[in-house]
Each structure stands twice: as structure tokens, then as C-alpha cells.
Image (cartoon, grey):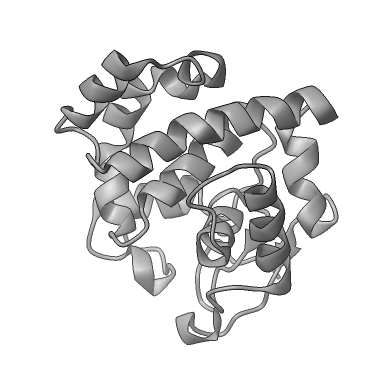
């Protein structure tokens, strides 16, 4: 498995390889997983994805397995505990964003029945499979990520700029950007 040809970004770290091979570009329709990935992509802003992947399990523990009902009710004591937790990125704006995003997520679920139904509308409810030749062909944003970002912000979500939204779309398989030569690329 280690010798398979892969997208160049995932070489050099086993955690990147596992993530690439099992998750990146794989369509996710699970509300909780989609919410977790939106939060984690926001946490990554200004940092490397490797940093977040290495802290992912601690994030899950710290944020109650991304149970939005619990997260939406965090009080000042819980916020202080999160900001003191060395296992996550201790950035006040990002911690507060997770809590605000939980509240916004719950409103979307209440309004539309599921977060999945809402978020997948930005790609017409089916994965966009691109045929990128090399990493340099992958854009940072697309019209779909622009629209997603704009609507998420309007609904109260934080750390959801268009670049973050495009990375989220790749992470959850809304977009498949595996490049030429990668064993995961679809024909």
C-alpha cells in the first residue's frame, strides 16, 4: 500500500497517506462527520492540515465527538477549559467559532431536516469529479465554494471563507481532485 502512486501533497507522513487513501475525496453524507470536517477545516486556517490531523482525536474528545447539541451549550467554564487544552489549537476566535458553528448547524438541521441536504446542494447533490493533471491545476476556490461560503456566513457560521469551503468540499468528497497518476483518481 505504501508504494501506490498518490497525490503529491500526502507524501512523507503516514497520517497524510491514511487520510488521502481513506477519506479525502470520499463522499460523506453523515451530518456529524460533515460538521466535524467543517469545523476542522476552519481550525486549519493559517496552519498546515498535518497539524490538525495530528490533533484530530484530541479535538474529538475536547468537543464531545462534535455533538452540536452539547457544543451549542458550552459555558464560559468549558470555553476556558478548551483554551487551556494543549491538544487543540488554542485560538479564542477558532474555539468560539466551533461553538457558534454548532448553533448555526442546529438551525440548519431544524430548518431543512439535515445538514447533508443543505451542504450538498452547492454541488447539485452529487460529487464533482475533476480531471486535474497536477496539483497546480487545483484552484483555491470555485464558484461553488464562493456560494457555500457566502451562504454559511449569512447563516452565522464562522471561519468559512471560500478557500476553507473548497478544502472542506475536497475533504468530504463533494469534490474529487485526485490528480493524474494517483491510484484514487476516477476515470
Residue found at x 55% / y 28% = 102
Residue found at x 31% / y 62% = 46
Residue 45, position in %: x, y?
37, 58
Question: In the visual, does 94 lie left or right of 12?
Answer: right
* Vertical order, 43 against 131 (above or below): above
Residue found at x 22% / y 31% = 83
Can residue 161 be seen?
yes
Which quarter of the figure has residue 11? bottom left
Residue 2, position in %: x, y?
31, 57
Question: In the visual, does 128 lie left or right of 89?
Answer: right
Question: In the visual, does 183 lie left or right of 8?
Answer: right
Question: In the visual, does 148 lie left or right of 65?
Answer: right
* Vertical order, 15 against 70 (above or below): below
Residue found at x 67% / y 67% = 146
Can residue 113 be seen?
no
* Vertical order, 64 against 82 (above or below): above
Comparing 108 with 15, the one in front is 108
Residue 75, position in %: x, y?
37, 15
Which quarter of the figure has residue 187? bottom right
Q: Furthest residue to the front? A: 76
Residue 1, position in %: x, y?
37, 53
Comparing 22 with 141, the one in front is 141
Tell how many labels: 0
Which quarter of the figure has residue 76? top left
Amino acid at each position: 500500500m505504501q508504494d501506490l502512486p498518490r497525490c503529491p501533497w500526502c507524501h512523507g507522513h503516514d497520517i497524510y497517506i491514511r487520510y488521502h487513501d481513506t477519506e479525502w475525496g470520499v463522499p460523506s453524507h453523515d451530518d456529524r462527520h460533515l460538521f466535524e470536517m467543517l469545523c476542522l477545516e476552519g481550525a486549519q486556517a493559517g496552519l498546515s492540515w498535518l497539524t490538525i490531523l495530528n490533533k484530530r482525536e484530541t479535538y474529538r474528545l475536547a468537543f464531545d465527538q462534535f455533538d452540536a447539541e452539547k457544543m451549542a451549550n458550552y459555558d464560559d467554564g468549558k470555553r476556558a477549559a478548551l483554551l487551556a487544552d494543549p491538544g487543540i489549537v488554542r485560538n479564542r476566535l477558532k474555539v468560539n467559532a466551533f461553538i457558534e458553528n454548532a448553533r448555526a448547524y442546529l438551525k440548519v438541521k431544524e430548518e431543512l431536516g439535515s445538514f447533508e441536504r443543505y451542504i450538498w446542494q452547492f454541488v447539485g447533490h452529487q460529487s464533482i469529479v475533476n480531471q486535474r493533471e497536477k496539483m497546480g491545476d487545483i484552484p483555491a476556490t470555485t464558484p461553488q465554494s464562493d456560494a457555500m461560503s457566502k451562504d454559511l456566513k449569512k447563516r452565522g457560521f464562522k471561519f468559512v471563507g471560500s478557500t476553507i469551503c473548497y478544502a472542506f468540499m475536497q475533504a468530504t468528497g463533494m469534490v474529487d481532485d485526485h490528480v493524474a497518476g494517483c491510484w484514487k483518481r476516477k476515470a
